[in-house]
Each structure stands twice: as structure tokens, then as C-alpha cells.
């Protein structure tokens, strides 16, 4: 397992290099000029002289290969560049916004685990009954709505109509609840269906038939079924964590949360290349790390997979 883990960790470096190369090239092929956008944002008339001066200031007057080499060299030394708009270090801005994104993703993950696991078990126990169909129909109805539409509905009902939660921002700690619900709803039905289907398949296994033949109580048999069904649930959950972090982009903008996702959207509109590049690399790294963690946990928990390493 140690050798397998070290090999996977070693692969992260060339993968990140490839992602950085593709990202830098595609972003810099954009037809719009970041220098002109930066001038307009700062309410400066974009004359040819001002644009040329800004391009020199941002380093955009150098050849593409030279700019990439310089950026990659700084990246290796921990310097992610300076924002074209705010003139602040990119790493500093992302670290400032990261706690909000982590809090949103963490609360959403808790909601997914609690409701996905519990409702999935209930649906499997009461398979094809009214309870099963009602739960799945209710959850799937709300999950079918896009995130932005669900967020607006939650704001209208719970914020404007009932006045229970703030409409935006994090001035009140309760401001994270509606965004977390909005983000979690798009995942809950997936995990309800996963847990339900896995438990239903486990019911057909021979160990369940043998347990019933021994006269074990149904409650004890259900515990064993749940335990065996947790494995794919945990694996899928580990793969969804980076998706939750990436999925905060829309939710943070709807609820005006000062998170990494909102910074990324603002950077896209303002052609803030260093910020966009850092965000993409950060998300790619998250996907790789959690993918590795899931693979390691899977092989540790299943001896059959360890023999294939």
C-alpha cells in the first residue's frame, strides 16, 4: 500500500504540470485584452498608450512561452502571482475566501450524509411502499430544479416570506444554512438512490438468506445489510467532496457569499488570469487528492483489491 500510495503521489506532479500548461495556454488565447479590462474596471480611459503601459505592467508584452516559464517558476516557489484587478497576491485572496467555501461545502456534506443515508435506508426497508415512493418523489422533485432556481425559491420563501434567514452575506451565522441546503439538494437524491439500490441488492445475497435461516432478528440482519452497503456510499461520497467545492460557484454568487467560487466568477468577468489559473489548479489538486484518498480507503477496506496492486 505504501508503494502504491507513493506512485500515485508521484503522478500528481506531471498531471498538475499538464493542467497548468493547458490552462495557461487556453486562457491566454482569449481574444479580450486583460490590460484593457483592468483599465475599464478602474475607470481609466483605455487609450493605446494606457493599454500599452498596463500590458507592460502586467507582463503581457512578453512572449507566451516566456510568460509561462516565469509563472511556472514562481508557482514552484509558492508565488501564485498578483491579481490584475486588486493588485493583491492571489494566494492571499484565496486563503481569505477559502474558509467560507469550506464551511459551505462542509455543512452541505453533513446534510448529504444525514439525509442521503437515513432516507436511503428507510426507502430500502420499506421498498416499493408508499413511504418509499413518497420520499423518492419528494426529493427527486426538488433535485430536478437547477441550483440557481432552487436558491431563489429558498430566498423567497424562508427569507422574504418567513423572515427566518438572511437573503445574502455572512453577517449572521445562519446565512450559511440556505446556501448549504441549495448545494446539498442536488446530491441528496443520488445518495438516497445509491444507498437504497445497494441495500436492495444486498438483500438478495446468500448471507442474508443464511441469517434468516438461523433465526436472527430482522433488526440485526438490517444492520449487516447497512454495513455492507456503506462501502460504495463512502467511495462515492469521497469523490463528491471536490465536486462540492467546485459547485459552490453558483451558490456563492446567488447568496453573495465571499467565497472562492465568487472570486473565480469575478475573475472570469475581469479577465484576471492569475486568479483563474490558480483556481483551476486548486480544484484539480483537490480532485487528485480526494481521488487518491478514496482509492487508498477502498483498497484498505477490501483485501481483494489489495491483491491487484
Image (spheres, helix red, strand yellow):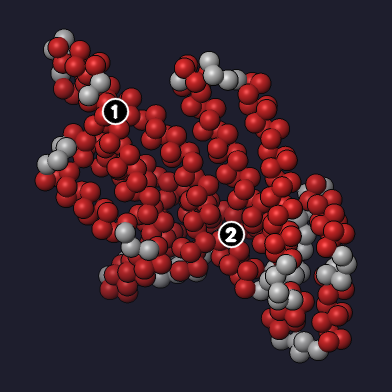
Question: Which numbered circle lies on residue 260?
Answer: 2
Left or right: residue 168 compared with residue 162: right
132 versus 224 height, above or below: below
Question: Which numbered circle lies on residue 31?
Answer: none
Residue placed under numbered mark 1 in the picture? 226
Q: Would you call the spot at circle 2 few (<14 residues within 10 Å), some (14-19), or many (20 or more)? A: many
203 versus 275 height, above or below: above
Instruction: Point out residue 140 in the picture as x, y percentages from the top left corner.
Output: 27, 54
Q: Nearer the viewer, residue 309 or 47?
A: 309
Q: Would you call the spot at circle 1 few (<14 residues within 10 Å), some (14-19), or many (20 or more)? A: many
Residue at 40% x, 45% y is 110
Q: Quadrant where the C terminus lies? A: top right
Q: Quadrant where the N terminus lies? A: top right
Task: Describe the element under mark 2 as helix, strand or loop.
Answer: helix
Residue at 20% x, 12% y is 210
Q: Is residue 260 visible?
A: yes
Amino acid at each position: 500500500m505504501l508503494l502504491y500510495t507513493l506512485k500515485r503521489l508521484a503522478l500528481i506532479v506531471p498531471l498538475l504540470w499538464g493542467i497548468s500548461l493547458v490552462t495557461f495556454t487556453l486562457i491566454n488565447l482569449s481574444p479580450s485584452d486583460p490590460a484593457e479590462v483592468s483599465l475599464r474596471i478602474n475607470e481609466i480611459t483605455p487609450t493605446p498608450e494606457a493599454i500599452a503601459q498596463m500590458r507592460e505592467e502586467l507582463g503581457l508584452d512578453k512572449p507566451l512561452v516566456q510568460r509561462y516559464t516565469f509563472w511556472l517558476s514562481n508557482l514552484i516557489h509558492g508565488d501564485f502571482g498578483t491579481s490584475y484587478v486588486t493588485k493583491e497576491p492571489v494566494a492571499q485572496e484565496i486563503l481569505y475566501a477559502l474558509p467560507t467555501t469550506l464551511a459551505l461545502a462542509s455543512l452541505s456534506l453533513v446534510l448529504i450524509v444525514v439525509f442521503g443515508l437515513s432516507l436511503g435506508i428507510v426507502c430500502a426497508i420499506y421498498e416499493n411502499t408508499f413511504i418509499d415512493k413518497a420520499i423518492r418523489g419528494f426529493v427527486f422533485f426538488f433535485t430536478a430544479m437547477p441550483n440557481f432556481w432552487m436558491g431563489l425559491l429558498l430566498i423567497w420563501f424562508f427569507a422574504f416570506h418567513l423572515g427566518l434567514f438572511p437573503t445574502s452575506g455572512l453577517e449572521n451565522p445562519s446565512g450559511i444554512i440556505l446556501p448549504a441546503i441549495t448545494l446539498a439538494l442536488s446530491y441528496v437524491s443520488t445518495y438516497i438512490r445509491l444507498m437504497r439500490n445497494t441495500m436492495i441488492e444486498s438483500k438478495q445475497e446468500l448471507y442474508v438468506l443464511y441469517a434468516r435461516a438461523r433465526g436472527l432478528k430482522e433488526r440485526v440482519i438490517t444492520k449487516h445489510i447497512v454495513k455492507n452497503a456503506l462501502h460504495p456510499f463512502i467511495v462515492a461520497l469521497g469523490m463528491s467532496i471536490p465536486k462540492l467545492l467546485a459547485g459552490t460557484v453558483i451558490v456563492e454568487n446567488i447568496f453573495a457569499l465571499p467565497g472562492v467560487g465568487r472570486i473565480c466568477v469575478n475573475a472570469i468577468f475581469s479577465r484576471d488570469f492569475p486568479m483563474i489559473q490558480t483556481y483551476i489548479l486548486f480544484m484539480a489538486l483537490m480532485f487528485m487528492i480526494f481521488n487518491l484518498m478514496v482509492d487508498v480507503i477502498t483498497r484498505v477496506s477490501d483485501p481483494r483489491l489489495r491483491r491487484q496492486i
